[in-house]
Amino acid sequence: MLYLELLIQGIIYGSMYAIIAVGLTLVYGLLRILHVAHAGLFALGGYLGLLITNATGSLLLAMPLAAAGVGLVGMVVYRLCYHPILDRPPYVALIASIGLFIAMEEIYRLVFGPYGLTYNDVPLQSQIAFLGMNLRTAELAIVFGSVILLGTLSYLAQKTRIGVAWKATVDDPQMAASFGIDPLKVRYLNFFIGSGLAAIGGIFISLLSNLVEPTMGGVPSYKALAIIVLGGLGNVTGTLIASLVLGVVEAFGTIYIGHLMDRDAIAFAFLILVLMIRPQGMLSGR
Amino acid sequence: MGIYEVSLATIVLINIILALGLNMITGFCGQISLGHAAFYGIGAYCTAILAKAGFPPAVTLLCGLILAGASGVVVGLASLRVREDFLAITTMGVGFLFLGIVRQQEALGGELGISSIPSAGMSKIGFMLFVLVLAALAAAFSLFIKRSWMGFAFDAVADDEDTARVLGLDVAAYKLSAFAMGTAMAGLAGGLYTYFARFIVPDDFGFITSITVLSMVAVGGIGSVFGVMAATVVLTLMPEFFRFISDYKLLVYGALLFTVMRFAPGGLAGFLQTALRIRKARGETG
Amino acid sequence: MTAILKVSGVTVRFGGIHALDDVSFEVTPGEFVSMIGPNGAGKTTLIRAITGVVQPQSAEIRLSGREISNLPTHKRSRLGLVMTHQIVRPFHSMSVLENVIFAAGHGRIQSVFGAMVSFDLSRERDRAMKLLGLLGIAEMADKSVRGQPLGVIKRMEVARALALEPKLLLLDEPLAGLNHIEAARLADTVADINRRGTTIVMIEHNLGEVLRVSERLVVLDNGRKIADGNPNEVMRNPAVRAAYVGKDETDAAA
């Protein structure tokens, strides 16, 4: 019974990681940038979602609005932050991204206050019996929401013209450009979708903790970075698998080796272990 | 000099040793590290424990330096397996792993850290002068390495390690040396910090510290000894200069980091070089 | 005469595909051997396997009689087996001269501790300048590598390889991308280097230059060796003609 409970916990966290990590891996796959400021967009999603829910009372309205808003901010971040420095060595974009992330956290702190915000009435808290366990609706919503969103995304990537253009650009930017695909449009789309998903991730985590605070983006995003590396950097399927695996490893690890190291350390110990055995990640890149 | 100025000068000098250590790894040898603070922490904890056990500073500092350097070689082994972005995330993981383990250890004080560490047996000014001498040695050592054939070989590894290997360079040995020397310097800085603060907690050695040190190196200009020293002075003192706007100091810090990378990716040293070249070119034509 | 390089039974598979299938050949000291074959024949893979950049599934590689197939690349290079890449790989952060000085200092950088305490580069600078002179690019010495034309960088890479004092120099398409005149000049320089005593194995598509300067041809097709010997005889070999017809006719005509 304990195993099943841990497994479910792992899947819940894993789904949340997946929503955050897919955005990061989309950016990495296209631009080879470790986009740390993704964490800032994740937190912004949490804030927007909470504020809209508190104002309107509707989480269902808040989610798409927050996702679209954060998606637009993501496009602006690309245009102002990354677009001008794409031809520089990778550490330049990395450090610029870290600088941007620190600045974003500070802006949230100054605007929304250091102690964070809470929901007037936290949505989706009713208990549901599931396989003999009591789960919160929010936890189930996270798992099913992630599956639906990522499933839709993968369907669109395969079936629509723009999706095919996007995949072509990721595989071979020059070839795609020679077929008349505008790489800039693809990058904007990429940042819009990735950042929108981060916003959903931010809302999900706030439903579990009933708290949105300036620094909430940090740890999940560092883990998301670990996940995209585990998944083979830029490999979307690998990222999804790695998210679930990491969620489950953390859930079991906290029980069995929690006295040796904390939850975050378990995640990174697992990352290092995997990389030493398979330097190209669990599923190798493209 | 008042006590406040002496303290500031001491912490600036400690940071110089710390940053020059990372400059050895990232600047000279081109191996990005997002976990430098872990070695700073290893030196600090080692020194703290030995100092509380009654050993004199000469012994404790040396042990901190050696332990950090030895750990650096182990992490350096990782740099032989993974490269660039994979290495960045692996070293970030090392940082979180260190923190996560220290937090769970009763013997290391857990979250509360180690307090009432004995003093180094010097006056505040005496200790500052002691650190000054060590910082000068660290700078001299850096310049010495940069000008030697070892520095030449580091340039080659940083530029293109595959070509360096084809030209007969034992790339692995050079990477490990860079990690050993750079992390040993971090260990020394950590030991000095222990005697300076006489109270250490895990968060002193977290991800933010690693990033701060990397910023010093990047803002100074990757690989430039004097640039890194100048940037360390500026970035360490900046929060103090901006105390009158203390609420905004991190915002300014993040924005500065972003701005330097966005507009002068070569850092201070690169910026000066470009400026000099423009003046020189003008002098030749005019 | 004993072979300076004896390669036997080299097999390399990528995934399920045989990139090289049981290839063997020998090179005697002082020879100038050219290796030709259609694109994808496995030429580059073969010299990468010889230098250890690619790990073969099976191979026996002897340099002057010594088995080297278990040594890492940098050790093979120190034994005198040096290669230049098909795609130029200069150190971009250095000047043309510094690229060559670095290679000329290969003795100084063998041991980490030795490298730490040696500073003098005047001897290496002199040797590097001589080599740049031999390759005819002495006047570019202090220029940054960035922005140099391909012809200069290709010559610089040959100088850099020579600075390692190779017993055997492996050149991967040194003439590719050069215009007619540049190619002929570099081919002459390579032939000159060979006359000065360096054994050379050269992969090259430019058959005109290959036939003009080399003493022996080895032909690969589909990962197998299909011919080996005197250039004129090899070119009359029906298997070689079959491999080339319709594939590299323009090159063959050149």
Image (cartoon, rainbow, N blue to C red):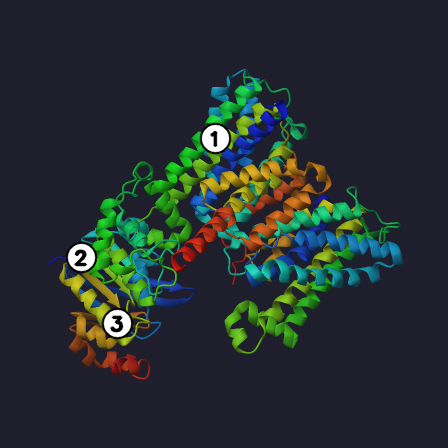
- Is C84 above or below relative to C238? above
Give the residue type at disc 1.
Ala
Quadrant of the rendering where the N terminus of chain B is positioned: top right
Picture residue at 66% right of the left edge, 41% below the top = A263
| Closest to the observer, B102 or A90 | A90
| Closest to the observer, C165 or B277 | B277
- Is B67 above or below relative to C161? above
What residue is pinned by disc 1?
B135
User: Which mark, residue C4?
Assistant: 2
Quadrant of the rendering where the C terminus of chain B is positioned: bottom left
Mark 2 or mark 3: whose residue is earlier in sequence:
2
Q: Secondary structure at mark 3?
A: helix
What residue is pinned by disc 3?
C183
Graded by Cα atoms within 10 Å as few (under 14), some (14 to 19) or many (20 or more), the crowding at tag 3 reads some
Q: Looking at the image, is mark 1 or mark 3 nearer the viewer?
A: 1
Asked if both marks, 1 and 3, belong to the same chain, the answer given is no
Is A165 displayed left or right of A16 in the figure? Answer: left
Disc 2 versus disc 3: distance between alpha carbons?
A: 27 Å
- Is A160 above or below relative to B152? below
Q: Secondary structure at mark 1?
A: helix
